[in-house]
Each structure stands twice: as C-alpha cells, then as structure tokens.
Image (cartoon, coloured by chain):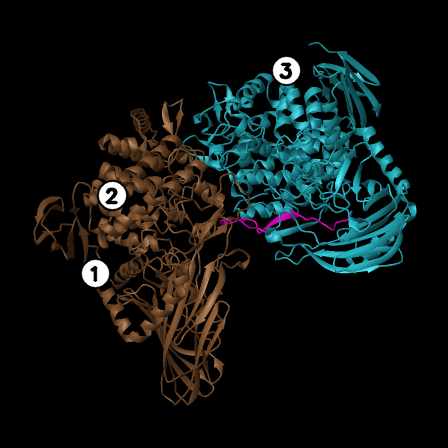
Chain colours: A cyan, B brown
Amino acid sequence: MGRLVDPWKVVEEGLDEKENLILESLTSIGNGYMGMRGNFEEDFSGDTYLGTYIGGIWFPDKTRVGWWKNGYPEYFGKVVNAVRLMGIHVEIDGVPLDLHHASVQNFYRELDLRTGIFSRRFTVQMPKGLVFVRAERFVSLPQKELLAISYAVTPHFDGQIVMKPYLDAHVTNRDSNYDETFWDMLAEEENEDSLALLTRTKENLFGTPRFAVGAAMSCWANGLELERRTLRSGYVEAVYKGTMRAEETAILEKYALCFTSRDHEEKNLVTLAMRAASRAREVRYEKLRAEHGGAWEDRWAACDVEIGGDDAAQQGIRFSLFHLQGTYTGEDERLNIGPKGFTGEKYGGAAYWDTEAYCLPFYLAVAGQDVARQLLRYRYLQLDGAYENARRQGLRGALFPMVTFTGIECHNEWEITFEEIHRNGAIAHAIFYYTTYTGDQEYILREGLDVLCGVARFYTDRVHFCKRRQQYMIHGVTGPNEYENNVNNNWYTNRIAAWSIEMFCTAAGQAPAERRALLGVTEEELSHMRDVASRMYEPKDEGQGVFVQHDTFMDKELLPADRIPEAERPINQHWSWDKILRSCFIKQADVLQGLYFLGHLYSKDVKKQNFDFYEPMTVHESSLSPCVHSILAAEIGYRDKAVEMYRRNARLDLDNMNNDTGDGLHITSMAGSWLSIAHGFAGMRTVGGLSLAPFLPDAWRCYAFQFRYRGRLIRLQVVDSRATVVLLEGLPLSMSLCGIKRELKTEISHTLTE
Amino acid sequence: MGRLVDPWKVVEEGLDEKENLILESLTSIGNGYMGMRGNFEEDFSGDTYLGTYIGGIWFPDKTRVGWWKNGYPEYFGKVVNAVRLMGIHVEIDGVPLDLHHASVQNFYRELDLRTGIFSRRFTVQMPKGLVFVRAERFVSLPQKELLAISYAVTPHFDGQIVMKPYLDAHVTNRDSNYDETFWDMLAEEENEDSLALLTRTKENLFGTPRFAVGAAMSCWANGLELERRTLRSGYVEAVYKGTMRAEETAILEKYALCFTSRDHEEKNLVTLAMRAASRAREVRYEKLRAEHGGAWEDRWAACDVEIGGDDAAQQGIRFSLFHLQGTYTGEDERLNIGPKGFTGEKYGGAAYWDTEAYCLPFYLAVAGQDVARQLLRYRYLQLDGAYENARRQGLRGALFPMVTFTGIECHNEWEITFEEIHRNGAIAHAIFYYTTYTGDQEYILREGLDVLCGVARFYTDRVHFCKRRQQYMIHGVTGPNEYENNVNNNWYTNRIAAWSIEMFCTAAGQAPAERRALLGVTEEELSHMRDVASRMYEPKDEGQGVFVQHDTFMDKELLPADRIPEAERPINQHWSWDKILRSCFIKQADVLQGLYFLGHLYSKDVKKQNFDFYEPMTVHESSLSPCVHSILAAEIGYRDKAVEMYRRNARLDLDNMNNDTGDGLHITSMAGSWLSIAHGFAGMRTVGGLSLAPFLPDAWRCYAFQFRYRGRLIRLQVVDSRATVVLLEGLPLSMSLCGIKRELKTEISHTLTE
C-alpha cells in the first residue's frame, strides 16, 4: 500500500481516498499545450478535483476583495477549467462504475515519467464476480491537441458492458465565486464517426479576449457496438454496449482533440477537431503511443539527470524534469510558466517572477537558447501593460506584474501588487543571465534595452531622497520574504533596484545614439539615474557584518527557527498574520536571494556571514526557498545543508511537505531542483565564461547531467572522487574546472579533494 | 433651487436627481430603536438607496477577501436593510406616480430638526392638470416601534386616486454579494384593520442568533375606500381608492409598527405589531405627532447649542445633535453607535473605537451619566469576545474588536483587524474619562477593572523586548493614521498602551486583594506589567522637539499638505494605496490624538510643537480628524484654525465635503462637532475637577450650551467678551473659569481678554 519510491515512476498502490487529491496532482500530465490532473476516466463520487487546462485560456474574473483600495486591478485572471476530455461512464450489468462506492481491489496507478503515460489498473467485486479494468492515457508530445485513452474492461463472468465516452463542458472552477461558471455552450455536432462541441468563455466586463474551444472525440471499440449518440447543450456522448463472455476484454480507445481560437478561426474549430479525431482513430492508439513515447525518449536523452545510490533523490529530479517539460516548450511566445502549470488553478495567472528567477536558467541549459529567449520575449511583448501598471500607481516607467496573462496586473493584495516591486529586478537579472550565459549581447540592443529602460525608470521614480541621510531610499515594499510586508529599505529590493538601474545605464551608454533616442533617454536622465544608483541606501549592520533585511529588522526578537514547536509548523497554517509579520522568521531567501543573483559581486566570506545569520531564521515555507539556500550552502562548503535543501526542493510535492500538493504541483520551483544540482553540487557559474566546481553528496555514488552552452552539448559526470566533463556536441571551449582553466576538446577530468 | 442654510432645518428646493442619495442621507430619521433614510413613500425609479434599519438586527455575512489570512474572522457583520415600512404606491387616473418619470414642479423637502419630522411637498403635471402632494413622517420618540406617515394628494381636477400602502420584506442590502438576500419570509396576516408580515434573517453558517421581525400597518384614509387587501410572501398591501373632486384632498395616514425577537418572543411578534398598529390608528396622526414633537422639545431643552451670528455653524451643530440623539439613547445596553447609524450600511458593525474616543464624552455631558455608562457596559458585556479575539491571534488578554456586533471581531483587513490595536487604549481611556468626569470611582471596582485587566494583559503580551535598546517595543501596528500600515513603534500606540497598563496597575493596586484574586492577577504579573510600562520605547526627535509618529517617519519626504494639487484631493480617491502609504500625509490625528487624550500630562508647549509639526501634513480625510485638531488648536491659541476645523467637522455631511455623504452620514464624528465647541472653544476640562476657559470665535456673536456634570445641569454662555456660567440644576460647585478657581452657586462670569 502507498506511494513507492521508483527512479522513473510515480506509483501508488491501493486506493486511499484521503490521498486522492494529492495523487491526482502528482499524476498530472501535460505537453505544453494542454494538460490535466490525474482524474479518473470513469465516475468517481469521492473527493476529486477535476481539472483540464489549455495553455493561454483564461478568464478575467471580477476582483473581489473585502475593502477596495484605489488602484486595485479590476480582475483576477483565472486559469479556466476547460471541457472534460477524458470522461467515460462505465456500466457493468446495469450498475454504474464508481470507485467511491465499488468494492475495489488491487488498485494501482502509475505515472511513467520516461514515456509520459498515466495508467491505472484495478479489480472490482461485482455481484456476479470480479471485473478487471485497465486504463491508460497520454497527451501527445508530437500532436499537441491530442489526448488518447485506452480503456479496457475484462469481466470474470458473462456480463453486459456499457461504455459511454463523453465530452462535457459543464465544468466549474474550484476557485470560482458562488460556483459561477465561465463557459457559454455554443454548439454540438456529430458526423459519421465523431462527436464535437464548441464552447466559449463568457462575456465579461473587461473587454478582454474571449476564447472559443472546439473539442471532438472519436472512438474505436473492440467487443462493443455503438448503440446511439447523445447531444445536449455542452455535452456529447456515444454509447457502446456489448455482452462479454467471461475473461473477454472490451477495449475502448478514445481520441479527444482540442483546438482553440487562440490558434484558429472560431468557425473552423469544430471541423478541425472532428477531422483530427477521425484521423487519430485511423492511426490507432498503439502507433500514437509509440510516437509519443519516442518523443519523450528524445527529451530525456537531452535533459536527464542521473543519480546513483539515492533513488529518492533520483525520483525527485526526474519528477521535476518531467513536469517542467510538460508545462513549457517555448513553442508559443504568448505562453509562460504558471505556478501550477496544468495541475491546478491556485494563484491564477500565467507568469510570476518565478519564471525569471528560477525557470529561465533551467530552460536555457536544458531546452536551449531559443526556448529561453521566448521567456524574455514574453515580457518584452507585455511592456505596454507594464507601463500601464506603473501609471496606475502614479509612477513612471514599467512595473511588470506580479500575476498576469496580458501584462496588466491581476493580483489584488496591496502589499504584493503595489509593494513587491523587486520582481522588476528579476527580469533585468534574467536579461543579464541570458546574455552572460549565451554571449548574445545583441539581444540587449534588439529587445532587452526597452525592458531595462522601463525597469530603470520605474525604480528611479519609486525612490525618494532622504534629507537626513542624503541618500535615496525605497519605502513601503515587500521583499522576497513575504512574511514581512510594507517594510522600508529592504536590502534586496534596494540592491537589485540600484543594480538594475546601473545595468541599464551601462547598456544605454554602449548603445548607438539613435537607439537611445528611440527610448527618449537623455544624458540628463542617465545622469540622474546614475546618481540614484550610486547613492542608494543599503542597510548594513557593521557589528554582525551582515546586510540588514530592512530598516528595523534588527529590533526584532531574533530567534532560530528550530525554536518553533513542530505542532505550529508551517507557521502560515498556524499563526495569525500579524504574529508572522512581527516574527523574525523568513519565508524564503531575501538578503540571500541577492547574494545568489549577484553572486559574482560578493566574496564567499560575505555569503557565509549572511548565510550564518539568516538561514537559521528561515522556515522555507515558500517552495522557492530551498534551492537558493542549497546553492549558497554548496558554495560556502555546507554540503550537508546543500543536500538537505535539495531534498526539500525535489521531493516537496512527492512527499507533500507543505501539505498543499492537493491544490496542484509547485511547477516553477521544480526548476530549483535542477539548479540545486547544477549551480549547487556542480558549482556551475556562467558570468565571465563557464566554470564548474563539483562535489559529490555523501550519500550518492555518482551523478551526471548534460546541458547546452553556446551551441554545445556538455555532459558532467561525477563518480566517486572523479569529475569528468565531456563535450558531446559542438566546438572546443575554454572553461574552468574546479578553479583551473582548461580547454575542453573532447573530455577533461579532475580528481576531487575533500 | 438647492440646499438652504437654516438654523433648524435641512431644506432642499427642487428635485435634483444627481443629489438624491445625498439628500436621502441628510434627511434620515431615527429614534435609537430604528430609523430610515429619506426615501420617498411613493415609487421612485431614479437613483435611490432604500434603507430601513432596526437597532441590533444584523447578519453575519461570510467574509470574502481576495486572499485569506490565517486568523481572519469568519464573517463580516452587516447592518441589515429591513422591511420597507414607508411604502405607498400611488396612482392618479390609472397612472402610477413615479417622480423619476413624472413632470415635477416646486419640489420641496425638509427635515425639521426641532420636531424630527421629515416632510415633502410637490406638484405633478398630469394629463388632466396638476396634482399637489404633501407627505410627512416621523419615527416616534415616545413609542419607539412606530413610524407614522401622513400622505395627502390633492388633484386640481376631478380624478381617481388610488393609494396602496404596503410592507415589503423583499429588500436587499446594497453591500450584499451577488445580490444575496438576508431574509426568509415566514408569514403574512390580516385582521379587521391591519396587515402584518413576519420575516427572519436567513440560516447562516456561523451559529449566531437569527432575528425575527414582525411588522404591521394600519391605515386611516380620508376620501378613499378600502377596496381590497393583498397578501403575498413577504408582502402585504391595502388598496384604497376614490374619485376626488378638484381641490379635494385624499389623505392616507399609515401607522407601521415594528417588533423584533430581540425584545419579544417570536410567536408574539405579529400579534403585538397588529395590536399596536390598531391602537396607533385609534390615537390618530395629529396626536401622535404632537407627542413626538413634545419629546423632541424636551431633548432640545437639555442639549441645544445656540450660536449667534453664524447660521451655517448653527445648522451644523444642530444637525449633529439631531442625528446623535436619533441614533443612540442608552435604553438598550446591547446597542452601540454604528458609524452610519440608521442612515446607511457602509462599514457594517455596530461599534468602532469612535464610540469611546469621540461619542462617550458627548453623551456623558448631554445625555448624562447613565447613558454613558451603558456605553462602557457594552464593552464589559463583550469581554469574552475580546479575549477570544486575542486568543485567535495567539495573544493573552482581551483585544476589543475593530468592528463588531457581539464582541467577536468581524473586520477583515489584516492591517486593521490585527494591527490597529490602539483601539484597546481608547476603551481604557473612556473608563478614565468617565470616572474623572463623574467621580464614580466605584465603577472601576464594579466592571472597569475587568476591562482594564484584559487590555493591560493584551498589551503586555503584544510587546517584545528589543535587546539592542533594552526597551519594550510594539511592532506591526496601524495607528489612528490609517494612511500608514504595519509600522513599528507608533508613538500613539506605544504611549496609550503603556498608559493603559499603568492605569490598570494603579487600579489593581488600590483594589481589595480578593478583587485582584478574582482576576487571577499576581504581584509577579503586576510587577512585569510595571516593567513593560516603564520601559516602553517612545520614539522622539530631539532636534525637532517632537514625538515621532513611528520609527522611520523622519526618513520620509516631509511636505506640507498644501503641496497636494487640489485635483488630487481627497488623496484616497486619487492616489494608489502605496503612494498614500509612502507619503508623509496624515489621515487623522495620530501623535496629536495622544496629546488630546492625555492632555493633562503634557504642557501647552509640547502640544504646540507637535501641532506645528504634524498638522500641516494632515489631510483630515477621516471624519474623526478635524475635532481633535480644533480642540488642540483652541488650547494653544490658534483660534482661526480651531474654527476652520469646527466647520469642517460640523458641516462635513451638509456640504458633502468628502464626497461620500450619499453612503450615509458620519454619525460618530458628529460628536466631534460638540467636542470642538465644548472642549475646544469653551475649553472644558474635567480631569481634577471642572474647568472652563472659553473664547468667542471671531465670526460669532455669541454661543451657549448646557451640560450635565455630577448631578448638575450647567449652562455656559459666551456673549461678546463675557463668559457666564449658570447653575441650572443641582448643588453648588467649585470649578475653574478662565484659570481662576470659583464657587458656582447660581451664576459666575468672567470678562474675556484677547
């Protein structure tokens, strides 16, 4: 019974309904275009969270808050639960199959990470005997609009089997207010061998685009006869029926295809979907499955991280890699990486600062430069919205949104929306990271400069001059540590703001005059910007030798987090908000986030002093926290801490550590699992050229991974005390290995010392 | 056309529909038991905000906020819009009368403050000629359950008149979510001469009391015949009809009576209401009106403030006095003073800290000791709820709620609910004010000590010890200036907390040991409390010689409020919240609130230095701001500023200064109008005995008011340069007049110098 640790699978034996939401999240599948939770095909009246999501389909739900603040966004952008594609009602001898009521034996479900196939098998005790069911499905990598299902029923007695595959657009969001629905039903159609329906997101107050979805299904049934078809508003169904002899298997193959008005004209959607469904049926399940498996095989060849001697760690990283690749492919520049991907609705929105801060380095190394550049481009395309966000706050420049689909802010906590302005800096840093990693300096002139200009202008206007200190200050912010709100002079925010302004000034200074003129940037503006950057106040505590999180942090009662009783953790589920705010406890890296981002500017000693001061007060209750600590710990030589933090990151959802996996997976922070290994254990640095300085975690026998770097594919493997770098593709390269300059032509290696 | 300034009336000539909500608010009437906005009896399809409210009838609506914080209250307690009592559908020659569509001439409405009667008159152009209408109503002071209406229609042609008086329980709150209704319809009944209905607030999730309301009406019609009665779910109606000759008047008198399960058994409500309605009809309108007018006359005799030479100022204070007396009478210890009284729904809740901070001194002086003690008792009775509020925040002691009906917090902005903890201090101060005013020191032993103990325990637990400074601090608060949130060491909060703790320690020290034992207070606890109070950190700026609003206030860009462009005021309607928070601009007295409350502990020089520093940065966008500034300005000799602030307070709603009068009136701040005159212009102080030190505002010829003090009724009149104090009732008294100790036997006077 229970979840098993397997290096290539998520496996659960037995049906424990209390765990069902968690398992539904863990067994979600996606292909960058669409995805769905691990819901059952057949009926299930127990606790379930039905979710099918299509990339870029969202609804601007009216913002509802207790007390309105001037400047609040008008809507909260929700990920919309879309037409239920997978459903099959099953009846055996006239009794509907519902695993909540049925007597279920030997229930087994498995997500095969290697092939991207989710399957289940179980036996049900019926009055006349046992029935064996095997279900399997995948959303296709080669054909992104396709969900294919194979559903097999084998009675161990002579019995009548009915299967009713259906499409149902009567779905609601779990986070809808008053169970409001977000869809209008437009049409249902049938032709010779397929059924389709068309829906469109409801009229709304905000004049934003509405999306139409056309979905069709076509089936192939072995042992069953098509009896009839039913079309109702927003619902289509085919009924297959047959009498099976004992041990004979009825197999239904269902091909559900989904097209949207994001990519096609609305009037063609039904036809497109019906044709595609018919074609898929002609190809048949086994062939589609093989093509899909082959595509995943190619992916793994490029991205796998192998860990020897620690299956839990191995499963964690593969689980992360699987979901990251199923969430974002870079094919569509209008998409980004939602915090829950296709696994849930929580947080809404399509892009948080997580994308730049954590995901970009991962996709750059694993999926390559073109994919990563799409992420940068997403912000470039939303620059108008970012200028509008700033304008609504009465400020110049561009404020990239905390949560968005379109560039316009759609988050509505004032302490976040208006105050968590460090997010702008992460976007500047992503441009820095991309250009130093790739050497593609031209990118700054093409698109980057516009983004940097908006960021620099915003920060320059957001500061005020403090007469007493004769320095610039930033009041009223929330730093990365969201367990403090509305603080003054958050070191991280002040630092990243000054650094972003400097970066723009440097880039603008290097740009041709006509490029600067396009931006309307004058020498006077640049000179003021330089003044702001150079006279930005940075709170420091000389006694402790640390940067101070914000102005009055040192007045707090400073306690280590291990003084919090276990029964009161996570504190965000036990303490009232004011108690959290007043405490010294830190949700996620804050000063340390700055020392990670700007690591090339700070010595190991500075990092160590700040790590020693802040990490003990950190509760890591954001999924984004452990990886930064893992990387810094690795750099300053705290290997056990680095490994502990890696585990916390890589197995967060697998072990439901924050007691919230049922809501969906922490997709963006999964990139942190990879970063912990690459930037942490392997010591990868890319400012001023590539360097690696690996160590091997004590409990591991070996590990290896490959990454793309400036047109090359490079593999690092660390076995016992030997680190080997292999050039798999591309031209020779000068790099640093364990602090020594080396020329990588085919392979170099180094013996590690303790 | 327009609103007229009249010393005894609110008058509007002409029907300007854009101003209708404002006029509805201004012409609200109430009697402490129930009240209603100045809605029309007949139909009106234009912009109207229908509101009929009954004291203590509320609904625990589910708290809805954008993002849930741990510890948030489960409900938001809403003032419920109750059965529409006043309605009369009118038809003339078959055409329904609706002033939005009718051709209306000579529209006139008037609230007579002296008699508490709201009346309207107007002429309507009908196809056959003109029709004159006169409507008048009052909620009775002597019979609190009674609303009496006289509605007269005079056609200037022969025509058919239909009047359909009704009761309608199909009302919704303006602040309901998704137009949810809060009432279940239970019964409709009729007997010989009256119609009744019974409703009950809906089942709700929170297990709080549900309220039933039985309302009945009985009518007397002159010139019309009763044609039929109609009873539908939640609606009863009588139809009167007649054909009038030209210039004949059809008069309908409607008596609507309203009883609730707060005072009577639910099963008796309908019978009670029907009997009372029949009785009222027997007594007849004119007699009831005379009794009501007589009761108001008695009130005015005791409370009037006369101002000579300034009708606008005169109207302002009488308007304030009228609404304060119509909102709270002290008869029911379960009631308190809601911020909108019976004039609107905004803010919900029945009691804010406004009650103790502003209203109590007014009711104590004008309505007397027994009424004021009911206000103190309200908190005493809710002490269990206050302990529960603190417990939910993980703290000891009692935290009185920001907004409540039952003592349990029902406000849901974290920066207010969890952080505006200075409200506890206002309650301690009210006990101090009451006991020093009345000399009733026994009150502390009876009830006050329990309240003070809860307050002191809360503050003592809410501080933390700052090692660096070796002092106690209070982090994470919102002071009275709600334009800053989550600040540290707000001087006012720290000061009132230390003072409240001291007050408790002193009172506990003087109490008999068994009384202390009842509270479980030990010497050790008291000793720790004394330590906290004596080592409480108080931010000061020695350079400027002022108390500092909070830790980092002096780092702000400090600008005078007159630098804000007129088009951007009020800033809360123009600036985004973060801009407001970062600015230096102050919503209402903060440091100065402390210097007002604890005025006996600070010199005039200290008050002046702080006033000079803070007042110029104050935007007075809370209705509670001007009075405190008026009083302090008077004390330090800034008479013009004192008068300016008085006007701003007394005419806030009459002149719709904050552009929000349409939502309802600012009831609690109306007490500030009286305080500005009594504590401000008249210099009344009551710590250590009574003293008066009046001046006469330049623009005034004279002013006079009376107040109750320790069993006496005392009148102060200031005419030109002569201040005279007259003992109207009670024993002789030692007091101070203009700084000179005097014996008041019948009358004393003093010549004022400039």
Disc 2 from disc 1: Cα separation: 26 Å
Q: Is the Cβ of the residue at disc 2 closer than 8 Å to that at disc 1?
A: no
Q: Is the Cβ of the residue at disc 3 closer than 8 Å to that at disc 1?
A: no
Q: Which residue: 38% across, 51% down?
A: B350
Task: State yes or no: residue A181 in magenta.
Answer: no
**Residue B171 visible somewhere in the drawing:** no
Q: Which residue: 80% across, 15% down?
A: A748
The residue pinned by badge 1 equals B306
Crowding at mark 1 (Cα within 10 Å: few <14, some 14-19, many 20+): many
Chain that bears disc 2: B
**Three-letter amino acid code at disc 1?**
Glu
**Element marked by disc 1:** strand
Chain that bears disc 1: B
Chain that bears disc 3: A
**Share a chain, discs 2 and 1?**
yes
Crowding at mark 2 (Cα within 10 Å: few <14, some 14-19, many 20+): many
Q: Nearer the viewer, residue A741 or B635?
A: B635
Q: How many marks?
A: 3
Identify the mark at residue B433; answer none if there is no mark. Answer: 2
Q: Nearer the viewer, residue B686 or B698?
A: B686
Residue B734 vertical position relative to residue B38 in the rendered view, above or below:
above
**Three-letter amino acid code at disc 2?**
Tyr
Residue B428 left/right relative to A297: left
Residue B17 left/right relative to B423: right
The residue pinned by badge 3 equals A637
In the image, residue B239 lies at what x, y percent? 45, 79
Residue B596 vertical position relative to residue A745 in the rendered view, above or below:
below
**Element marked by disc 2:** helix
Which range of residues does the magenta coloring cover?
A62-85
Query: Which quarter of the picture shows residue B429?
Result: top left
Query: Which quarter of the picture shows residue A566?
Result: top right
Disc 3 from disc 1: Cα separation: 81 Å
